[in-house]
Amino acid sequence: MLNTLKTAKDTQKSDSAYVSEPNKKLSQIEIRLKTIFENELKSNDSVLVNYKPEVISKLAQYISGKITRPASIGIAGETASGKSTITLDIIDTINAFADKEKLENVITRVNTDDYYYDRSDMVKKAGSFAQFAKHYDLDIPDALELELMHAHIKELLSGKEVYLPKYDMSGTAIRYDSHTLAKPSKVIISEGLFTLTPKIKNAFDFKIYVDVRQHVQKERFYIRAEERHLGDSAHAIYKNASQKAEIYIRPCKQDADIVLSGEAVRTRYKNFLNKIIAIVEEEHFLKN
């Protein structure tokens, strides 16, 4: 009887030690992540403006394997904030890691801008995109079919292939539906003006806002306006974009898990992400 109790007690201790091991690993990952984030926050030309502490815990759960389902990332910010450039740098960095480890279907991009409604008939009637833009507000969430985007992201996260739309940004306002085949992957990433607005924000596990000073954003906007041949309408478009951003986009900053600077040197974004990827590599690849 005593031997039986002793055996049971030893087994209980062993089970307790086994259960606590994953928690220990999770805690260690959290400590390492916090160090990375804090060091970046304190550095010169930091990519980080601020972050919510709970994002560290969630990220650690994904890295440790405690959460095994795919993760979705939503990136928002005002026009010309740098969100698309940052998104492409994130994709390139993750794909470089995937190539190194010979992994497939690691990251899939869903571009929010591709969900603008087709208004090509209105552009033709107006005579040009510039004239169309004077009378049609593209700077509000209702200009996009965000409900469809939400459904597509959820399908990808559930492991289904989806045909995504493609919006022509050259000035035709044409949207080609069922244009691009998107395959489910470990990471689904989206960016756009309205990516973190109420109709779509709940589709994302990680919410990122890209912040930029107004004079930098304005300079970038006018360079882009010239490339898109907006002519004299650029002034009215910028004014409207700024006014609508105050209503629809800037409030998204408070919902963001991470606020990034849209002005940091591009290599800094990749360097920061690679420090996080290094933890993933150590936990899941170097030991094999």
Image (cartoon, rainbow, N blue to C red):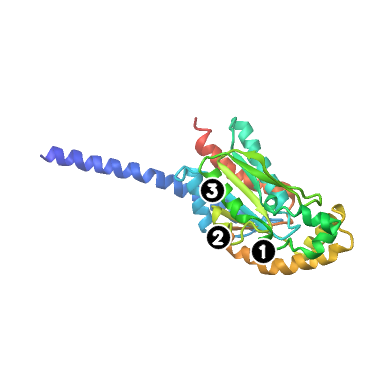
Q: CA distance from mark 1 to mark 3?
A: 23 Å
Find the residue positioned furthest to the left. 1
Q: Name the residue type under label 3.
A: Lys
The mark total stands at: 3
Marks 3 and 2, the one that precedes in the sequence: 2
Rendered image quadrant of residue 179: top right
Viewer-proximal residue among 41 and 177: 177
Residue 180 at what x, y percent from top left? 67, 40
Viewer-proximal residue among 36 and 136: 136
Viewer-proximal residue among 185 and 132: 132
Residue 218 appears in the figure: yes
Rendered image quadrant of residue 246: bottom right
Q: CA distance from mark 2 to mark 1?
A: 19 Å
Find the residue positioned furthest to the right. 232
Q: Which residue is mark 2?
A: 52
Can you tell which of label 3 and label 2 is closer to the viewer?
A: 3
Can you tell which of label 2 and label 1 is closer to the viewer?
A: 1
Q: CA distance from mark 3 to mark 2?
A: 24 Å
Q: Name the residue type under label 1.
A: Ile
Q: Is residue 198 above or below residue 83?
A: below
Q: Are marks 2 and 1 in contact (CB under 8 Å)?
A: no
Q: Which residue is mark 3?
A: 154
Q: Which residue is mark 1?
A: 249
Residue 31 appears in the figure: no
- Which SS class for mark 1? loop
Rendered image quadrant of residue 201: bottom right
Q: Is residue 177 above or below residue 212?
A: above
- Which SS class for mark 3? helix
- Please rate how many residues cluster around mark 1, counting C-alpha atoms within 10 Å: few if below 14, some from 14 to 19, many from 20: many
- Horizontal side of 49 relative to 121 (left or right) equals left
